Amino acid sequence: MDYKETLSWLFSQLPMYQRIGDAAYKADLGNTKVILSALGDPQNGFKAIHIAGTNGKGSVSHIISSILQEAGYKTGLYTSPHLKDFRERIKINGELIPENSVTEFIEANKLLFENKQSSFFEMTVGMAFEHFNKESVEIAVIETGMGGRFDSTNLCNPILSIITNIGFDHTKFLGNTLEKIASEKAGIIKDNIPVIIGKHNYETDNVFLDKANEHKSELEFAEDLIDIRIINSDDPASNRYDIWKGDVNVINNMSSPLSGLFQHENLTTALASILFLNDAGIFSIKEEHIRSGVENVIKNTGFYGRWQTINTNPLVICDAGHNIDGIKSTINQLSDMVYNQLHFVIGMVADKDTFEILNILPKNGIYYYCKPNIPRGLDENYLAEAAFKAGLNGKAYTSVTQALNSAKNNAGIDDLIFVGGSTFVVAEVI
């Protein structure tokens, strides 16, 4: 198979949660263990930083990876889902895994995968771990998929576990309370391996503390370790921070290209983790590495799709936030912006809490409903009907492109077009 045929096999022959939902979810690590064993247990060949959480884990993963790269460490990065290119999932120092490596890996292991009826995610994790091992990375930053305890990435060997935050998402699989969801995410905590929790939450703090005590793991909350203070600026697109550790200003006037308000929390988690590892003597990272790592995160890692401006006349912004907490962050950001009329291009996937999300969206926006081009995408007419019941005004379109083009045609110079609701909607407009 050539590369195109390999991807076709990966996407169409075997189930993938991001595309089809329930059929791809396995609450079992048995298959992944068999795959990794057949590959020679490549996860044992490198150190890892393992990151779980409801929101922000992608941003935290990319920030940490960029800082490690700037400090001179050969850094692997595994994230999901991808937006445009499958190879975005597996990078070393920002370089995508080569096409021939993807093809050769599948060709060498296709029979095993077919015999075990392996999931897309199981195969991709195996591919990432083998690639990182073969290329002798010094550290790999590994983002979980949906959960934690039964996530295929949970077979890595971390020097630090990070849990960004806990919110309601994938409740069918992870539980319908924050405590249950936190318990699944806490499944990445391992014996004697320190853990950083991004944010205090009275409903989940004890879940993490109890799990850390059970595993004799040191636990710290990121917001207790450092304080990131936003520096006021006349430029609304500027994001500048002072970083404080206790009463010491450890980094002064640092800028970040990640402009979403929610990135303040992600930056806190990422920098607290880096400083924790530095203090423990595991890494040697200087202030200049942290500063340049944050400032160059997009260039170093190819990170995009988070509060990204894709057009200026009219202004078009997209963001991949797709659950209730992510959408709340979007609304908070929109409320701080000045514009005449909001045009909201929105598509969702079928397993989200559709009405709960629609019910909190601004009632004065004009909505353009569409279906992301994946089997799991929610029908645009169903979405429009649900939105009407939630008091929203809009129209259904047959594709994301048609919806965006209509929004552009209707928008005035001083209007704002926002594109979101699903990672896959954002993927189609970038």
Image (cartoon, rainbow, N blue to C red):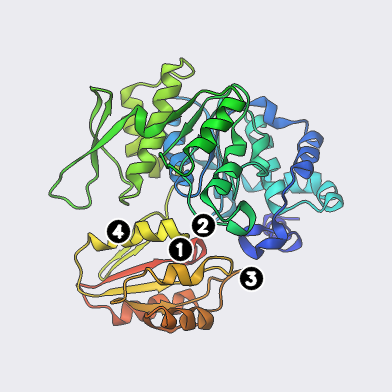
Amino acid on which the number 3 mark rests in the picture? Pro
Question: Neighbour class for label 4 at 10 Å: few (<14), some, many (≥20)?
Answer: few
The picture places residue 324, in percent across and down from the top left corner, at: 45, 60
Cα gap from disc 1 to disc 2, whole angstroms: 8 Å
Residue indicated by mark 2 = 83
> Quarter holding the C terminus?
bottom left
**Mark sitting on residue 121:** none
Residue in view at x 46 percent, y 49 percent:
55
Q: Earlier in the sequence, mark 4 or mark 1?
A: 4
Q: Nearer the viewer, mark 4 or mark 1?
A: 4
The answer to whether residue 92 shows anywhere in this view is no
Tell me the SS state at disc 1: helix
Residue indicated by mark 1 = 426
**Mark sitting on residue 332:** 4
Q: Earlier in the sequence, mark 3 or mark 4?
A: 4
Res 395 quadrant in image: bottom left
Tell me the SS state at disc 4: helix
Residue indicated by mark 3 = 375
> Is 101 situated above or below 376?
above
